[in-house]
Image: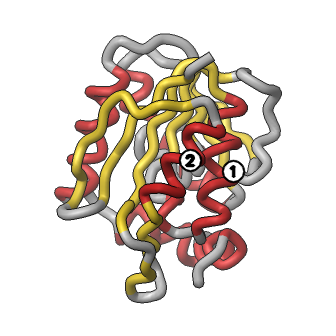
Amino acid sequence: MLNAAITRQTYFGEKARVYDAKNTETDKRSREAAALREFLIDASGTVLDIPVGTGHFIPLYGALGLNVIGMDVSIEMMDQAKVKIPEVDLRYGDILQIPLPDLAIEISVCIRLLSLIDTDEMVLAVKELGRVTSQFVIFSLKVGKEKVIKNRSITHPITVFRDALSEASLAIENMRIVREPDFLIYKAVKCL
């Protein structure tokens, strides 16, 4: 099964240098951006984008008047983001142990990563996002019957996901389908 260590190894070296060229605008990316825009339209404060990767969504946050901290375990991916957006605040950090105090960020965004790590790590990541976030978390995830597809994508059991949200004091407020039938973007609000 996939895990965070394998996923971390994927986004270094040549992969980081060519990531944007190989991942140009797609229908899926457009739907991700549309869902983010919808969920963030009335938001204010600071967004933690983890993993920030090459900074694909940073211009969207700026257009909405939000401050952003980009965090990733791949310095090389963040280097690509820095080339595109030199003024962005980028920091090294692991989603399984986010180096921020409790409730330090108003909004956290985690797109694509949770479907690349195993279910136990997904649970830890959701709890960490809940720990550092004071308002809401936006994340993408495949839910359904747990399975691995092509050694790259994991579908997580919905019951495990819901339990993780509850333990993180988060509740789903809204969701959008990014790709049928099971890849969704969720907005989960903090329940204090």
Disc 2 crowd rating (10 Å Cα; few below 14, some 14-19, many 20+) is: few
Q: Position of residue 114 (x, y in %)?
A: 52, 59
Q: Is residue 49 left or right of residue 150?
A: right
Q: How is the image coloured?
A: secondary structure
Residue occupying image coordinates x 37% and y 31% = 60
Q: Which residue, given by chain and number where applicable, does mark 1 sit on?
A: 95
Q: Nearer the viewer, residue 104 or 76?
A: 104
Q: Secondary structure at mark 2?
A: helix
Q: Which residue, given by chain and number where applicable, does mark 2 sit on?
A: 163
Q: Position of residue 108 (x, y in %)?
A: 56, 33
> Does 87 appear above or below 26?
above
Q: Quadrant of the N terminus?
A: bottom right
Q: Position of residue 70 (x, y in %)?
A: 61, 39
Q: Quadrant of residue 69?
A: top right
Q: Quadrant of residue 132?
A: top right
Residue 56 seen anywhere in this rendered image of the structure = yes
Identity of the amino acid at label 1? Ile
Residue occupying image coordinates x 41% and y 62% = 20
Residue occupying image coordinates x 69% and y 53% = 124
Q: Is residue 129 left or right of residue 139?
A: right
Q: Quadrant of the C terminus?
A: top right
Q: Nearer the viewer, residue 127 or 68?
A: 127
Identity of the amino acid at label 2? Asp
